[in-house]
Image (cartoon, helix red, strand yellow):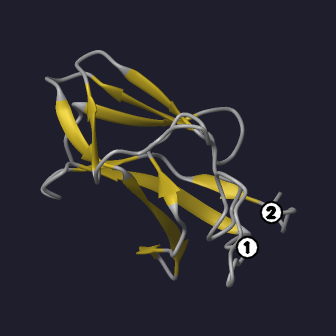
Amino acid sequence: MSTDVVVKNLSQPGAVSVTNHGPDLALRRAVLVEKHESGSWAATDADVRLIASCEEVEKGKSRVLKQGETLLVKSWNGWSCNGQCPRSCRANLYLGPGEFRFVVLSEDGKKRFEGAAFSLGAEKSSR
């Protein structure tokens, strides 16, 4: 695990920032949300993106985080499909309660930047 990019949980569960302490780096826009189950971490189906707001237009499958830049990622509320931004979803499921972490990957997938664990409580509204 590299320390060039730091994935830091903020005060509210599901809120996170990503800071690049190394040279400019292309990161995958899709953020892995892993759940701690049976003593290990497993990827979930959560659709979480490296976006700052729901109005942000994504261009391409990666996002360059410049040296010294911090991205305050639009928080995730625990839902699989519209966990960051309201949208129509056919199979939207609440993935909590449980212990989760965010994992950001370099564009080529060779570097993993894992955040600390955080807990989500009982089901909340998806809106």
Is residue 94 found left or right of 43 in the rendered image?
A: right
Q: Which residue is mark 2?
A: 126
Disc nearest the viewer among 1 and 2: 2
Is residue 67 found left or right of 34 in the rendered image?
A: left
The residue lying at 48 percent from left, 46 percent from top is: 116
Q: Position of residue 13 (x, y in %)?
A: 69, 46
Question: Split into 4 quadrants, where in the image is the C terminus?
Answer: bottom right
Report the disc number at residue 82: none
Q: Is residue 23 above or below residue 95?
A: above
Label 1–label 2 contact, CB within 8 A: yes
Is residue 39 found left or right of 64 in the rendered image?
A: right
The residues tagged by marks 1 and 2 sit, at their Cα atoms, a distance apart of 8 Å
Q: Position of residue 54 (x, y in %)?
A: 62, 42
Q: Amino acid at mark 1?
A: Tyr
Q: Amino acid at mark 2?
A: Ser
- The residue nearer to you, when weighing 57 against 100, is 57
Q: How many marks?
A: 2
Report the disc number at residue 94: 1
Q: Position of residue 59 (x, y in %)?
A: 34, 45
